Image: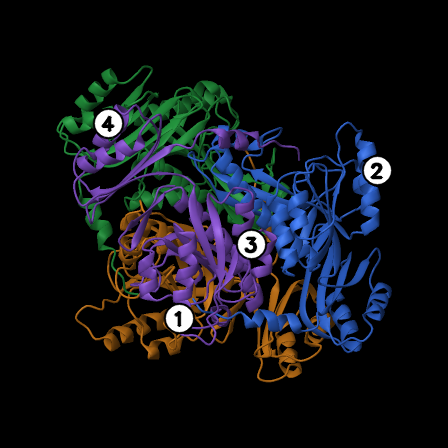
Chain colours: A orange, B purple, C green, D blue
Amino acid sequence: MNHSVNDVSSAALRPSPDLLLIDCPDRRGLVHEVTGLVSRHGGNILENHEFVDRETGRFFMRTEFVGVAAPARVEREARELLPAPATVRIGRAGGHRVVVLVTREHHCLGELLLRHLHGELGATIEAVVANRPALGSLVGRFGLPFHLVSHEHRSRDAQEADLLEVLERYQPDYLVLAKYMRILSRGFLERYPGRIINIHHSFLPAFVGSNPYRQAFARGVKIIGATAHFVTPELDEGPIIAQAVVPVDHSHMPSAMAQAGRDVEKLVLARALGLVFEHRVFLNGNRTIVFE
Amino acid sequence: MNHSVNDVSSAALRPSPDLLLIDCPDRRGLVHEVTGLVSRHGGNILENHEFVDRETGRFFMRTEFVGVAAPARVEREARELLPAPATVRIGRAGGHRVVVLVTREHHCLGELLLRHLHGELGATIEAVVANRPALGSLVGRFGLPFHLVSHEHRSRDAQEADLLEVLERYQPDYLVLAKYMRILSRGFLERYPGRIINIHHSFLPAFVGSNPYRQAFARGVKIIGATAHFVTPELDEGPIIAQAVVPVDHSHMPSAMAQAGRDVEKLVLARALGLVFEHRVFLNGNRTIVFE
Amino acid sequence: MNHSVNDVSSAALRPSPDLLLIDCPDRRGLVHEVTGLVSRHGGNILENHEFVDRETGRFFMRTEFVGVAAPARVEREARELLPAPATVRIGRAGGHRVVVLVTREHHCLGELLLRHLHGELGATIEAVVANRPALGSLVGRFGLPFHLVSHEHRSRDAQEADLLEVLERYQPDYLVLAKYMRILSRGFLERYPGRIINIHHSFLPAFVGSNPYRQAFARGVKIIGATAHFVTPELDEGPIIAQAVVPVDHSHMPSAMAQAGRDVEKLVLARALGLVFEHRVFLNGNRTIVFE
Amino acid sequence: MNHSVNDVSSAALRPSPDLLLIDCPDRRGLVHEVTGLVSRHGGNILENHEFVDRETGRFFMRTEFVGVAAPARVEREARELLPAPATVRIGRAGGHRVVVLVTREHHCLGELLLRHLHGELGATIEAVVANRPALGSLVGRFGLPFHLVSHEHRSRDAQEADLLEVLERYQPDYLVLAKYMRILSRGFLERYPGRIINIHHSFLPAFVGSNPYRQAFARGVKIIGATAHFVTPELDEGPIIAQAVVPVDHSHMPSAMAQAGRDVEKLVLARALGLVFEHRVFLNGNRTIVFE
C-alpha cells in the first residue's frame, strides 16, 4: 500500500513552458516555418501538435517550448509570417481567472472547489455566483466569495445585468456553468465568446424537455453520459470538449440514474477544464480540436 | 500463453436448465408462491431473478431450474395461480430459429455467422435474406441459404410480400436486422411483435437524417455508440436491450468513426441476442427488463 | 439546461425498507421458505436477490421489504429455519458509523467528505484518523474530528495501540482506508473482520514495489485502474468489491497517470462504499457476491 | 435506419500517402529540419506526430505526406541529416505480408479472416499456421493456405524448425499469434525482432499459471481485459500496443468470463494490428509510442 508520488511534486517545480497557439489557413511548410521561428529565438520544443482540417483547409498548432527570453516577439513574428486570417497567441498552462456559476446542485461545484484547494484545477476560482442561496455554505467552507444573483421576481434582462456587474469585478477569463440552471441570453453569451463552458447530462437517445432522468428511466436507457461543451448562441449545445458515459440498468431508479449522472458529469467537467486551461482545445467552427 | 478452457466445454455438456418466465401484476407473496410451485414439482432452482416495476405495478420473474419431469405442468399451474393479466412461459436457453436480414454491410452479419458456426450464437440461423446481392458470397462461405428480395423498382408492399413469403418457409422465432437498411411497414412489424431486433449507431447528441457519421464528425462528438433494440411501429426506436460506446476524437475522419462504430455495433448486437436467446429480456412497455 | 431532480428528494422521504441478509448452505426451497416467512409477518418484498455458489454450495440472499412491525422476529425465525452454519442479519441501508484513515493524499478523503456533507455517503463519518498531519486542514473545513496518530519514531505495535484507542472511542462499523499508506498488522485486521475497506490503484499487468505509476509509465501501460476491496491478513489484496479503469497513453507522464489514477480511485471507493453500506456485498471466501 | 457510408469508399480511392518514420536522439530543431526536408522535395504534410521521451532523450516522429516523386531520396537525406544512432524508414499504410499462428481457439482468427476478406485488415494474410488441426476448416472457408505444424511427439526445436521452413516460403513482415498456445524459443523470436504480435487476456490483479479464468472467477474479479503486445525474449510480456477491458460480476461463471474475454481479445488484437500496419507504433525500449 506504500507508494510515493514524488514525481508529481518534482514535476510541479519545473518552470511551466511557454505555448504558441496558432489557427490559420493551411499552406505548405507551416510546421517547418513555425518551428524554425521558435528555434531562431533559442527555444527548445517539448511537445508539438498540429492538425489540418482538410475540409475547411484550416491549420491548427500547439507548440510547447522553453528557453525563449521574449515569447511575445515569437508571437509578433508568427503573426507576420502566417497567412491571414490567423489567430496567434502566446500562453501558459494555468493562471486563468475563473468564475463559477451554479444553481443548487453541489456535485460539480464540490469537485472544482476540492481541486482548486489542492492546486489541481489549473486556474484560480475568483468567485462563485448563484441564482439560489443553497450552495453558499459549501463555498464558505473553502473561503471563496459567493454572490447570490437571484432570478426570482425579476426579468432575465435585469438578472443578467446584475450578473454582468458582479462578473465585471472579477474580470474572468472563463465562466464555468457548473449546473447553472438558467438559460443565458444571446447578448450575455456574446460578451464571453468561446469562454463559457457548460456541463450537461447526455443520453442515447437524447431527450428534450424537463426531467430527463425520468425520461431516460421510462425509456430504459442502458447508458448515461455527460458532455462538456462551449456555450454558443447558435446551437442548443455548442462545440464538444469532452464526453464520457457510465452503464445503468433497469434496476436503477431515476434517483440512482441521477447519482450515476452526477458522478460522470463532475469528472467530465473537470477533465474538460483541465484541457481548456492547458490551451489544448481549439474552436473549429462547431467542432473542437483537442490536442491531448 | 498456455491456458486451458476445459471448463467451457464441460459446462456445455450439462443439460440446459428449464426456464419459467413470468410477467403479471404484482401482489404480496408472488416469489414465494412461484418458487413453491417449482419445489412441489421436484425442481431445484439454480438462478432466480425478479423485478417489480413500482410505477406500473408489474412483476417480472425468470427462474432457472432443473429436475422437473413435466415443466409444462408447472407452466399450466402457474397460469392458474397468478393474477391476470399474466404472461407465463416455459423455455430453454437456445434452440431458437432465426432469420437475419441484411443489406450490404458485412460486419454484423460476419460476427453472427462466426458465432453460429462455432455454436456460440445460442440460436440457429435458418437463412439470411437481403435486399441487395453483396453479402451472398459471405453467406455462401458458411453454407447457409441466402435469399435476395430486392426492393428496386418495386413498391414496399410488393417487396414485403415477397419477404414474408420467404420468412414463411423458415418459421423464425426472431428476425435480426443486421444493418437492414429498409424501413419496415407497421403491418410487417405487427407480424412479429417483440420478435424483431435491430442494431444501430447512436450518438451523443443524436443525429437525424442521412450520413450520421458525417454529421457526428461535423459536430465533433467524442463518443460513438450502438444500441440494440426491439423494433416497434410506435417508436422511431423501440425498447433498448443493450448499448455500448467507444471514444473517438477530432483526428478520426468520418471513415475511421464508421469503423469504430461498426466494431461496437457488432458486439452490442451479439450481446443483445445472447440475452434474448437466454430469455433474459422482458418487454415492459417501452422499456426492457434485462436479467443479466 | 433546466431540469428538476425532484424525484431524488421525494425518494429520500420514503421510509427506508428493512433488509434480510442470509448466507447459509443451499438446499431445495430456500427462496420459497424465506419469502414465505417474510410474507407471514405481513412484509411486502420490494427487491430480492439470491445467488447459489454451485462450487461451494453456499446460498446468499438479500431481501428488501416493508410492512413488518417486528423485523427482529423475522431474523430469529429465519435462524431457526435455515440450515447451519447460517449467517442471518436484519439491516437497513445507511446508519453505519465510519472512521476514515488517511495519510496525505486528499482525493479520496475529499470525495467522501463532500458526499458525507450532502447526505450521499450512506453512512456517518465519525472521525478521520491520519498518520501525517497534512489533511487536518481539509477535515477541519468539514467540521469533523481529526486525529493524528503518527508512526514516526515509533514501533508499529505502539502506533497501532494508539490507533485502536482512538477507534475505541468511535465504535466504528467500518474502517475506510482512503489512501492510508501503512501496512496494518494481522492482529489489528482481526479486530475488524470484513469491516475494513481499502482502495488501491491497479494495473495491467500488475506491478509490485514502490512507485507503481513510474513502473506503469516505464512499461507503457494503456490502462490504469482502481480496486476497492476488503482487507484481510491472508491476502495481499482481499475480496474485491468494485473495480474500474481509465485509458492512458504514451503522452501521459507519470504525474498525469497519477491524476487519472486518483480520479478513478475516488469514484471506485465511493461506489464500493455505497454497495457495502446498502448491504449489497456478501463475503464468499476470497470473493464477494455483489447484488447491484 | 437508412444511412450511407459513401465517404468510406471515396476515402479508399485517394492515393495512400507516404510515411516518414524517425527514431533518433533528440536535439533542438528536429521537427523544423525534417519538415523542411519534406517541403524541399515538394511534399505536402497531411499529418505529423512527434514525441520526445524526456527520460531517454529519444525523438520519435511520424510524418504523412503526399506529392513527393522520390520518397526514397527523402529517406536517404533524412539519414544524413539526423543525429546517430537513427532509424529512418519510408513506408505506406497497408501492404504488409502477415502469417497468423493459431492453436484451436477461433475467435481472434475469425475476426482477422473477416476483416481480411473485406479489405479492412490493412495487410495481406499469406497463410495460417497451426499446431493443431481444429481451425483448418474455418481457414478453408476463406480460401487461404492452412499449414499444420504439430508439436506432438516432437521436441520444440524440431517443431520450430518446421515452422520456420513454412514461414520462409511466405516471407512475412509480421507474425500474428492469434491464440497460439506454444511458447516460442528465444532463437525463434530473434528471427522476427519487433515483428511478432501476441494477444492475451489480462486481469486485475494478474494471475500466473494455468486456467486463469478459473482463477479470476475464484478471486471474484470485476473486470476482464486483453493486452496486445510485441513478443520479446526478455519479458514475459513485451511492449504493450493496445489494451481494453470489459466488466464482469459474480454471476459470470468461468465460461461466461471466457466469452467476455474472447470478445475483448479479438477487438484489441484487431485494433493493435491496425495501428501497427499503419506504422503508428514505435518501439521505445520496453514501451511503445502509439501515434493514434
Please state if C249 lies on the left or on the right of B66 as rendered: right
Q: Nearer the viewer, residue B119 or C15?
A: B119
Identify which residue is drawn at 19% across, 73% down: A154
Label 2 marks a residue whose chain is D
Above or below, A86 relative to B212 = below
Badge 1: few (under 14), some or many (20 or more) residues near its Cα, within 10 Å? few
- Mark 3 is on which residue type? Gly
Ranked by sequence position, the earlier of labels 4 and 1 is: 4
Please tell me whether mark 3 sits on a helix, a strand or a loop. Answer: helix
Are callouts 3 and 2 both on one chain? no
Above or below, B222 relative to C242 = below
Ranked by sequence position, the earlier of labels 4 and 3 is: 4
Q: Which mark is residue B158?
A: 1
Residue B245 screen position, x and y as percent: 47, 55
Above or below, C95 relative to C23 = below
Ranked by sequence position, the earlier of labels 3 and 1 is: 3
Q: Nearer the viewer, residue B135 or D10?
A: B135
Label 3 marks a residue whose chain is B
Please state if C63 lies on the left or on the right of A117 as rendered: left
Determine the residue located farthest toward the bottom in the rendered image: A84
Please tell me whether mark 1 sits on a helix, a strand or a loop. Answer: helix
